Amino acid sequence: MAVTGLARYQRLVANITNWHEYLLHKNKRHARSLRFTTRPILQRFSVPATLYQVFKEIFMEDFYEIKQLVSKLPEKPVIIDVGANAGFFGILLFSKIKEATVFAYEPMPSNIFLFQETIKANPAMQAIQLHQKAVTGLPITSIELFTADTDSNTVVSSVFSGFNGLNNKKINVPAQSLTSIMEEKNLRQVDLLKLDCEGSEYDIIYNTHPSVLQKINMMVIEVHQLNSEKNNVKALDEYLQLNKYTTRFLPVQEGSFYMEAIKNNVR
């Protein structure tokens, strides 16, 4: 569960070597990007003002419970990162684990640009294969997203028009199904599927054949409560359990949850 209060600062110190940058300059974030270096494995990256909350969510609130997550992965995991944004999950991962094969998918150009700059600055992260695409369950080659009308980095672009009140622009982006990705990359097994895709988690999971899902050992998902018959955390939890996953989910904030699903024969 995401940590709060003083525990956030303990995670900041555990994850960031120059944690004082946050404490001394956080009020200057609108004037310049904050610049951080991770620990114990050094990865250097910048945080623009528009991604400040994402930084706090991942590096301070520890949304992905990174210590426990890494302990459940093999030494050299294969990971698919859907909704990679500017790469903060990948940065945190490569600060805790030396080698991984990561296929990262992000549809927004501004986020891709920042992620690419981070990869260039960090040799270990050049193992990441970054693709400017949305990921779907159904086999389609493009999809419409609703997003904020800005050239800055964005966080909550979604296939749902009412997902965020600031999403007043509609764009068409390339897309690829999860099944197609696994076939294209010849992935017989995936150690971790991470989904942070603003409501598209339901399409991806429900419309990927169970035989393909069974190639995925573990999932970590930001689940959004959309309140339809199937698009809610309880229905998704039941579906994954039917497909032989052991699950747990915890509330993060109003309308969203952290969910972990581990295939029953993987321990």
Image: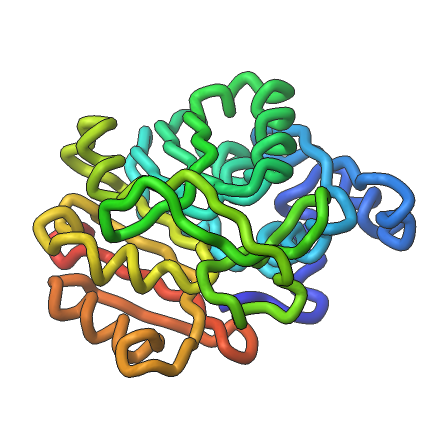
Please state if 12 lies on the left or on the right of 100 as rendered: right
Residue 26: image x %, image y %?
85, 52
- Depth order, front residue of 250/39: 250
Q: How far across and how far down the image is residue 98, in percent? A: 44, 26
Q: Is residue 254 left or right of residue 150?
A: left
Q: Residue furthest left?
A: 211
Q: Is there any visible trace of residue 62 in the rendered image? A: no
Give 3 or 258, whichever is nearer the viewer. 258
Quarter occupied by residue 148: bottom right
Does residue 167 appear left or right of residue 76 in this picture?
Answer: right
Please state the horizontal and vertical placement of residue 240, each as a whole percent of the image: 20, 66
Q: Residue at x 55, y 44 (%)?
A: 85
**Can you say whether 111 is above or below 143 in the image?**
above
- Count up the numbered dots: 0
Residue 218: image x %, image y %? 27, 51
- Looking at the image, is 59 positioned above or below residue 180? below
**Residue 87 versus residue 119 in the image, above or below:** below
Colour mode?
rainbow
